[in-house]
Image (spheres, rainbow, N blue to C red):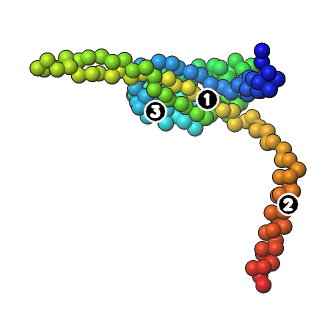
């Protein structure tokens, strides 16, 4: 059984998740360090510009990130049916690259030695943000408003003290 607070929190998180547009890529066979180099190039860019950057980037990681960005755009379109992507001002707000599973392989070397080869993978999550959507500002409570008015009064008294 779920308590009332827990249920309300779960419903609130579910509503917030409906407003987020993202895509996830798991176990991508590229080293996280190499993927971050490509991810840094598109972070904060407009979606069409980011696609162009990825399409003409020679790095292998860019093809994986391009597919992921197209998937995120598709997710945005599914949540916003009837809205044209050209009219919206979509940007890549966040790109998160985390280390995934590391496959360990042994490479034989001279004189009976063996070296460990680490084949790294990563998990990538990309978020899109619509700049046209207005962000609702929470209303300030009464004590905060009173504090704001006191601050305004304090600055005026300080100015008179400085003039004397």
Q: Which residue is mark 3?
A: 36
Name the residue rendered at 81%, 68% in the picture.
Answer: 154
Q: Image quarter for residue 105?
A: top left
Depth-wise, is mark 2 or mark 1 nearer the camera?
2
Residue 49 seen from this side: no
Of the 4 image quadrants, the one containing the N terminus is top right
Front-lying residue, 28 or 91: 28
Mark 3, Cα crowd under 10 Å, few <14 / some 14-19 / many 20+, is: some
| First along the sequence among labels 2 and 1 | 1
Q: Is residue 27 visible?
A: yes
**Disc number for residue 101:** none
Q: In the visual, does 141 lie left or right of 39?
A: right
Residue 88's quadrant in the figure? Answer: top right
Q: On the rendered image, what quadrant is the C terminus found in?
A: bottom right
Residue 29, given in percent of the width and then of the height, sits at: 41, 19
* Quarter of the view holding residue 10: top right
Q: Nearer the viewer, mark 3 or mark 2?
A: 2
Q: Position of residue 118 (x, y in %)?
A: 33, 22
**Of 58 and 148, the residue lying toward us:** 148
> Mark 3 vs mark 1: which is more N-terminal?
3
The numbered disc on residue 127 is 1
């Amino acid at each position: 059984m779920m308590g009332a607070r827990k249920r309300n929190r779960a419903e609130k998180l579910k509503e917030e998740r409906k407003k987020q547009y993202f895509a996830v890529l798991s176990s991508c066979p590229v080293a996280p360090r190499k993927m971050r180099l490509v991810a840094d190039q598109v972070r904060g860019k407009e979606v069409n510009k980011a696609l162009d950057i990825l399409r003409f980037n020679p790095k292998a990681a860019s093809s994986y990130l391009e597919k992921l960005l197209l998937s995120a755009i598709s997710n945005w379109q599914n949540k916003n049916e009837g809205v044209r992507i050209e009219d919206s001002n979509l940007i890549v707000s966040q790109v998160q690259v985390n280390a995934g599973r590391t496959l360990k392989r042994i490479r034989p070397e001279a004189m009976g030695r063996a070296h460990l080869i680490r084949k790294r993978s990563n998990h990538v999550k990309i978020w899109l943000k619509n700049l046209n959507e207005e962000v609702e500002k929470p209303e300030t409570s009464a004590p905060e408003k009173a504090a704001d008015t006191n601050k305004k009064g304090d600055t005026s008294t300080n100015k008179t003290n400085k003039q004397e």
